[in-house]
Image (cartoon, helix red, strand yellow):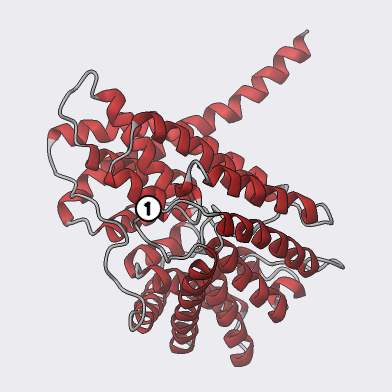
Amino acid sequence: MLILTALIAGLGSILLHEFLDLIEYLVLGHGETSTVQAVSTKQFVLIVLAGIISAILWYFLQRKNRQIISVKSQMKAENPASRQPKLWIHLTNIFLQVASVGAGSPIGKEGAPRELGALGAGRVSDYLKLTLQDRKLAIACGASAGLAAVYQVPIASIFFAFETLGLGISVLNLTSVSVTTILASLIAGVVISDAPLYEAAQVTLDVKNAILAIVLAVLISPIAQLFRRLTQKAQAQKATDYTILWRLPLTFLLLASLSLVFPEILGNGGAMAQGVFDGMTVQYAAMIVLVKAFMVLLTLKNGAYGGTLTPSFSMGAVLGFLGAVLCSQIFPAISLASAMLIGSSVFLAITMNAPLTAIGLVVSFTGQKLQALPILLIAVAVAIFMKQLIERNSYVNPYRSQTRRNRR
């Protein structure tokens, strides 16, 4: 079962990777490159056209009470629809997600390989007639393997299975997830490079960076928590009825228009992350992080499917840069490179609610050495503390407000 699941996730990730490259070249004229290019008139038209086509396809995929079942719902298998999602609907949705990101959609591509791995694992489970508990494990393995394969991040994906998918910790679960993710990563590695995605300097281990990690975590965590809540709200209110036919095309029209000024907002966030690593003015960074966040939320709410992993990574890097610039007014000689990676770790830890996964992704994406781990661990530990503090206050305040109204 594990070998079949890894094979499906690995080969599926290769297919999605190549498909993404094809769409990017057709629409944007280049692949996932670190070089930002101005948007031409032809590309502007193709981005808008991609929004129209995506809207039509997603509308028909969800007509007549059809549903796109999430990975977590498939793991729970509470009803026949979630136990065996319709194959053609989910495969179309998976490839449509990748195509829309390749055509410039500002959200992440990581949802597609995870869903493909989970879908394959579910079908293998049905064929082998596994128990509900074993089926849950298989789907978690498939989703994690898809993430591991497409980004070549097996260690981070192991953490993902337990932190995000809620898999219980046991020797069996740990062994199963590890075998599947590592094998899927090796299979996809035949085509997908395991080189770091971004060129970034190393995080140095010193007292100054440890203090910086604490300060940035305190500054960035509330922003990340707000973005997480807004993302959840946008996805809960996602357009699935006929309104998607005009809302999503208009969103892509706005995206194309904004990309004339901020070309880095196109795609899953890779260009934006590399842009801030290479150097960006403070004014431009402050504007682009707001534009990117707004477009991610608007795109999700108006009907598109996808993830927020790489957008969160890039927005965290920009916020880390801005936070470092702010702190440098008081403490000079701050490492901007360290600040950006701390920011990415904090933002990912909050938005994914997965601190170890966040650290694993940042280390893998940027090729960090072991010396970076203590600094990033300090940052995400403070971030999670801040998250819990914010959630506790959010829970208490509405109650207090209601009590005051009752007293009046």
For label 1, count other residues whose C-alpha is less than 10 Å away and answer few (under 14), some (14-19) or many (20+).
many
Q: Position of residue 202 (x, y in %)?
A: 18, 50
| SS of the residue under disc 1 | helix
Q: Nearer the viewer, residue 98 or 395?
A: 98
Relative to 178, say whether 272 is above or below: above
Relative to 317, say whether 68 is above or below: below
Q: Position of residue 115 (x, y in %)?
A: 57, 71
Q: Residue, x 67% and y 24% (percent of image)? A: 399
Q: Residue, x 80% and y 68% (percent of image)? A: 60
Instruction: Please identify the quadrant where the C terminus is shown.
Output: top right
Farthest bottom residue in view: 128
Farthest right residue in view: 64
Farthest left residue in view: 206
Q: Is residue 295 left or right of residue 321?
A: right
Q: Position of residue 75 (x, y in %)?
A: 60, 69
Q: Which residue is mark 1?
A: 358
Q: Residue, x 19% and y 36% (percent of image)? A: 335
Farthest top residue in view: 408
Q: Position of residue 76 (x, y in %)?
A: 64, 67
Q: Nearer the viewer, residue 142 or 95?
A: 95
Q: Is residue 173 left or right of residue 241?
A: left
